[in-house]
Image (cartoon, rainbow, N blue to C red):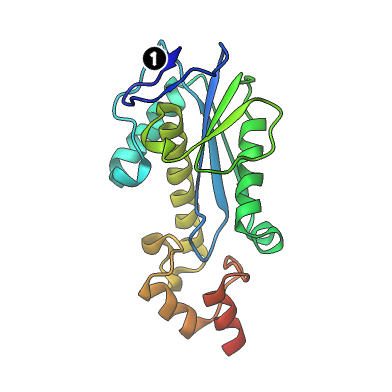
Amino acid sequence: MRRFAGEQQAFSWLAPGLLAGVDEAGRGPLAGPVVAAAVILDDLHPIRGLADSKLLSPGRREKLFDEIRAKALCVSIAEASVEEIDRLNILQATMLAMKRAVEGLRLLPQNVLVDGNRLPVLKVPAEAIVKGDAKVPAISAASIVAKVQRDRLCAELHAQWPDYGFDVHKGYPTPVHLEALRRLGACPAHRRSYAPVRDAIERA
């Protein structure tokens, strides 16, 4: 029976072999892609301080991101574009990004644990773990990688469209972002299927 550090729950169903943790970042924002990461940790090179990325400071996330990339057996990052989010809906786009992340791993995992209560369609055994980013180190690592990668993408969006403040709100519907939408309308990075963006386009 395999147990994971920092949790009491045991997953007795897991087959022997490599375990991949999967998580995403960017379901709630009004702009930019949704990003998913899949991480296979190395038991011989443990990483201290793994936790739900939302509970870590940006600086701590950045340091852990570099450590995860250096110590993990493999890391895969994937995304679903704004166009795919608008065409498929955010849930299906998130599942697509997760599927791409798992399929991008250079090593084939024997088990996949996904944060949340839904699973992408995968060719390997998988289980959804509610609040898995706080329970399973591999999912915690994936949440950190996905969050840092998406924040970096938001910095790129800010460089292209600085008047929206993507570097600060990361695309979330903060008052500053909503005011910019009302004042400037939508830019190409905005998700047109989201109501605040759709409203801004209609007003324009």
- 21 or 30: which is nearer to us? 21
Is 112 rendered above or below residue 182? above
Residue at 59% from the left image edge and 67% from the top image edge: 191
* Three-letter code, disc 1: His
Residue at 51% from the left image edge and 28% from the top image edge: 39
Residue 86: image x %, image y %? 66, 64
- 89 or 162: which is nearer to us? 89
132 horizontally vs 13: left or right: left
Residue at 56% from the left image edge and 75% from the top image edge: 195
Task: Say what secondary structure mark 1 lies in.
Answer: loop
Residue at 51% from the left image edge and 19% from the top image edge: 73
Residue 61: image x %, image y %? 34, 40
Q: Is residue 204 visible?
A: no
Is 81 rendered above or below residue 176? above
- The residue carrying pointer 1 sits among few (fewer than 14), some (14 to 19) or many (20 or more) residues within 10 Å by Cα, namely few
Residue 13: image x %, image y %? 54, 19
Q: Is residue 148 visible?
A: yes
Is 96 rendered above or below residue 204? above
Residue 138: image x %, image y %? 45, 28
Is 191 rendered above or below residue 45? below
118 horizontally vs 145: left or right: right
Number of numbered labels in the structure image: 1
Q: Residue furthest bottom?
A: 203
Residue 3 picture quarter: top left
* Image quarter in which the C terminus is found: bottom right
From the image, tell me which residue sits under label 1.
45
